[in-house]
Structure formats: C-alpha cells, structure tokens
Amino acid sequence: MRNAGPVIAVLALLALAVLLAMAPWGDSRFDRSPLGVRGLELWLKAKGVDVVRSNPRLKPNASDMSIRVLPLPGTDSADQPETQLEPWVLEEKLYEMPTLVVLPKWKDGLAKEGIARGAMLIPDADAQSPLSQMYLDDVTIIRLGARFEQVGLALDDSQPHKVALYRAQLFDRASLPDHCTELAGLPPGALLISCDPDFKVWVLSDPDLINNHGLSLAENAAFAVSMIAQLRGPEDRRPIYLDTDPTLLTESGEEDEGRSYERSASDLARLLDYPLSVIWAAALLVTAIAFWRGAYRFGPPQTGGEAANDVSRTAAIEAVARLLRLSGNDGRLTAQFVHDLLADKTVQVFGPGSADAAGIERLFDRLARRDARAADALRTVSRSLMEQGPTMSRAELHRNLHTFKELLGSTDLGSR
C-alpha cells in the first residue's frame, strides 16, 4: 500500500467536515430538545402565522412585531449561562411590546436525562421569582401531583381544544390581583392570565403548553396556536416575536455614542454557527477531495526531463501501435518493434547517437566476436522480421518473433 499519510489526512478532513455540519454549538441543540421551542416556531409558520426568531446580531423594530412570546429558561442552565435573563432586562422587555411570558417549570437537566421526575422541577421560589419582577408579587403558583390533567380549553368563543399537562403548574385564583384576569385554566387553578400593571403582559404558568414535548400531547399544539393568535388579535398580521435572547431590542441613544465592545471566545464561535457551519463543512470536503486527487490518486509529481521524455515516448509508441493494429498491419508493427528494440540495445552498449542501421550492424559485429553462431542467427531472424515482416503470415510472425526474443534474451550484450 502506498504512503497512508494522505489517506489519513483526507479522513481527518472528512471527519472535521461532518463535525462542523452537525455541530451542536449555539442553542440549536437545546432548542430542539423537549424543553425547546423550535416546534412552536415551525407549527406557527405551518398554520400561516408569521414568526420572527430572536437573533443576538439582528434586532428588529419592536413596532414591526405584534406580540412577543418570551419563554423563561430554567435556573440551572450551567451549559448555557448566556440564556439567563437579568432581572432588570425582563422588566425592560415588558415595556418594549406586549409580551406573553412563559414561566419556567423544569430544570434544563431534563433535556439530558429525559425523565420528568419530581427532582427535575425547579424550586417553587425560582418559579415564583419572575412574577415579582413583573409586579405580581401576590400571585401564587400551585403544583399538582405526578399525574396528567386533561381539560378542554378555549379563549373567548373559539373552538375548545383538549389540553393535557403532566405535573401541571398553575396560578392560585385566590391570589390574583384586581389588574389580572384569568383567560384559561383548569379546575384547580388558572393557566393563562392577562395583567396590566404599567404594561400589557400575559403570563402562562405551565411551559409544557408551548415546548416541544408539550406540543406532542393531546391537542396542545392546536390550542397554543389558537391562544397566540387570539392574544395577537384577529386583525393584526404583524409577525410574532419568539424571544430567546437575553438582550433588549432597543437601547438608548446615549449608550450608543462612544460605546466600546468587549470580545470573547464566544464571538469567535459565531463563525461556526449554522448556516456558516455548513459552508465550512463544504469547503473542507472540497479541500479533502482535491488533496486526495493530487496527493494520492495520481501519485507524487515527476521531476526532470528524463521522466517527461519517457512518458512522451511511451505514449507515442502506444499510439503508433494502436494505429497499426486498427489497420490490420501486424507485420509492420512487428518490424517496427524489432527495429526499436535493437536500437535500444545499441544505445545501451554504444551510447546515444548510435540508434541507426549502422549502429545495429555494429552491435551484430560485436556479438559475432563473442559468439559467431548466436550473432548470425540473431542477425538473420532480425533482418527477416524487419524486411519481410509486412508480407509474412500471422503464424510466421509469431514463430520468428518468438525465436527473436529467445536469441536476444540469451545473448550477452556486455557493456560500453
């Protein structure tokens, strides 16, 4: 086997290309987990509801959006601390546009463990904490046991949908203040409330109604789409802003002037985010193929004029032979072969410039001084093939050519 270095290098590049194409960097892996909201985005778009997904590098105008859907992350996001909201940021977001706040219920570790055990629930205090940032300190959260709650829900006069929630997280109706109204709920408590302290906000107590796992249960997906459409308003066709970005859409002009930026390793990781990861993978794949074709398939480059001459001469001989075979003139082909072979032997013995008829005769004379009988037999069969080959029958050509090869192979040509 040839040098395995190029093969190993190509395999390494291919592996890196696959890694880049399937890279789990950024929030895409969590977004597609049971706790993510990728399914909600796709479901809304499938039902004709325009959705704009938050992007840390692209900030749409708040006036171009209808409402914001803001799912709050769990409190143990050790893998993604950048998704956590500062308390003041949550409050400022509520002033930017009408917002549907979705309270957290599960720890982010559920995305890895995959089992909705009681230990995977965030502490009651952590679920309650965002309410105080929205001036809803009096609202109390209640949690039902380890069972499914199923009920038909509808907003206003819309068609009811069967909703199923496991370990349901609800609001205690008795704790709702006067500026909050229940829009949907289960018998034990309220599920969706509308509040208007100093801003317009809706609060959904249980995230399983809009996350990837919850959308697969009962008719949760249909109710989620109906709920968001109702909150947006039947006449409002502006996009829904699905917000998973811990920064604000708007900033004051004073902060914009002379603002300095701090760069970190996470900024470099943006170059590997989708879709740039696919572009990098394609570039590496093309490089690997080019490297293989150049370094392995065709071998190392040949150097020197001698190698080039050998290649050209071989190609010329093959071309002439093919033309002679196609014309059916094997005799001429054999005669040319015998002449060229003797000329090569002459060059080996006497050096360049001797590959002619005189040189061939000189070679025979040299052989005669060593073995007159062998030299005479070789001269006779060689002249016969070179002069009478075109007129010989196929059987005569094969017989004489066989004799020529045996005599030439058994003759000691000597050296210069």
Image (cartoon, grey):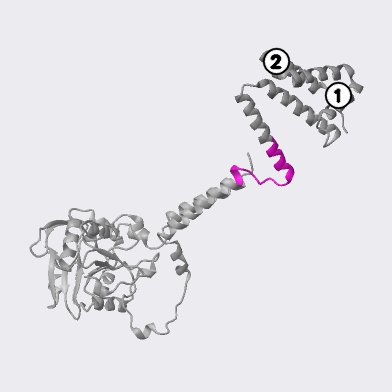
Could you say which quadrant of the image residue 403 lies in? top right
Kindly identify the amino acid type of the residue bearing the numbered disc 1.
Phe
Q: Residue furthest bottom?
A: 254
341 displayed left or right of 86: right
Quadrant location of the C terminus in the rendered image: top right
Query: Disc 1 on helix, strand or loop?
Result: helix
Label 2 is placed on what type of residue? Met
Callout 1: few (<14), some (14-19), or many (20+) C-alpha neighbours within 10 Å?
many
**What residue sits 42% from the left and 84% below the top?**
258
Query: Looking at the picture, does residue 305 appear above or below residue 406?
Result: below
The residue singled out by tag 1 in the image is: 364
What residue is rendered at 25% in x and 72% in y?
Answer: 64
Taking the image as drawn, is residue 171 in sight?
A: no
Counting from the top left corner in percent of width and height, residue 259 is at: 42, 82
State the residue in front, 340 or 370: 340
At 16% from the left and 61% from the top, the residue drawn is 226
Q: Quadrant of residue 331?
A: top right
Tell me the tag on residue 234: none
Rendered view: 305 above or below 263: above
Residue extent of the magenta highlight? 295-313
* Left or right: residue 234 compared with residue 298: left
Q: Quick one: 71 or 416, which is closer to the camera?
A: 416
Which numbered disc covers residue 392? Answer: 2
Mark 2: few/some/many CA within 10 Å (<14, 14-19, 20+): some
- State which quarter of the image contains the N terminus: top right
Task: Indicate left or right for 21 with 52 as reference.
Answer: right
Nearest the eye: 240 or 339? 339
Q: Residue 411 location, x and y as percent?
A: 83, 23
